[in-house]
Image (spheres, grey):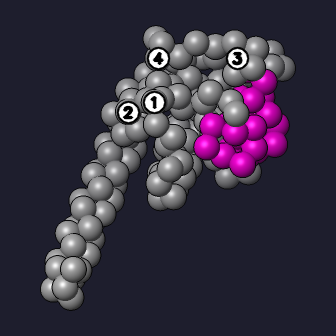
């Protein structure tokens, strides 16, 4: 392949990456815009689940603390919850770290669990399950963390 062909291929790849980055930014803007209008926990969870499915093309479960333990407070229909799922979600909550599929901690789990943090407070855990490993793209971790933090801030706002 010649120099010009390599340069053209590189330029096409850069344009593709810029378009993907722009679409993620637009999606996160849409999420934050919708979360601002949420008036209760049910609305926040519904907005998060809808946007996660759009942005990450996955199933979602959101775990929040209730009566001293982590409970599923919202989920998409096909996200099946079992004891292993609850265990990994609890680990992510307690340790304030991402865990599960595609991560360095408990990678054999069928889903990825992201702590929902607002400042120093862990508000809950967002579980992501899909056909693809959402962390295959290193930039996805930043998007996932931002997504989870926006949800945490919205939940914190409505409980005050």
Circle nearer the viewer, 2 or 3: 2
Q: Earlier in the sequence, mark 3 or mark 1?
A: 3
The Cα atoms of the two marked residues, 4 and 2, are separated by 12 Å
Q: Are marks 3 and 4 in contact (CB under 8 Å)?
A: no
For residue 157, above or below residue 2: above
In the image, the segment drawn in magenta is: 86-107
Element type at mark 2: loop
Q: Is residue 160 visible?
A: no
Determine the residue positioned at 33% across, 59% down. 21
2 versus 37 height, above or below = below
Q: Is residue 105 magenta?
A: yes
Residue 97 pos. (x, y %):
73, 46
Residue placed under numbered mark 4 in the picture = 76
> Of label 4 and label 1, which has the lower sequence position?
4
Relative to 67, is 122 on the left or the right? left
Where in the figure is residue 160, as x and y percent of width and height?
A: 62, 33
Residue located farthest toward the front when viewing the structure as drawn: 1
Residue to which mark 3 is pinned: 71
Mark with earlier residue (3, 4): 3
Q: Earlier in the sequence, mark 1 or mark 2?
A: 2
Residue 131 numbered tag: 1
In the image, is 75 to the left or to the right of 106?
Answer: left
Sequence-wise, which precedes: disc 4 or disc 2?
Answer: 2
Give the Cα distance between marks 1 and 2. Answer: 9 Å
Rendered image: mark on residue 57: 2
């Amino acid at each position: 392949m010649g120099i010009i062909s390599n340069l053209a291929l590189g330029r096409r790849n850069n344009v593709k990456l810029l378009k993907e980055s722009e679409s993620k930014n637009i999606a996160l803007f849409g999420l934050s815009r919708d979360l601002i209008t949420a008036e209760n926990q049910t609305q926040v969870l519904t907005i998060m689940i809808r946007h996660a499915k759009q942005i990450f093309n996955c199933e979602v479960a959101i775990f929040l603390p209730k009566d001293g333990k982590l409970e599923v407070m919202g989920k998409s229909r096909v996200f099946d919850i079992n004891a292993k799922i609850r265990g990994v979600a609890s680990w992510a909550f307690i340790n304030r770290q991402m865990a599960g599929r595609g991560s360095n901690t408990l990678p054999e789990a069928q889903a990825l669990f992201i702590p929902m943090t607002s400042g120093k407070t862990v508000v809950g855990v967002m579980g992501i399950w899909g056909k693809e490993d959402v962390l295959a793209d290193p930039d996805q971790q930043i998007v996932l963390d931002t997504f989870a933090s926006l949800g945490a801030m919205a939940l914190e706002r409505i409980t005050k």
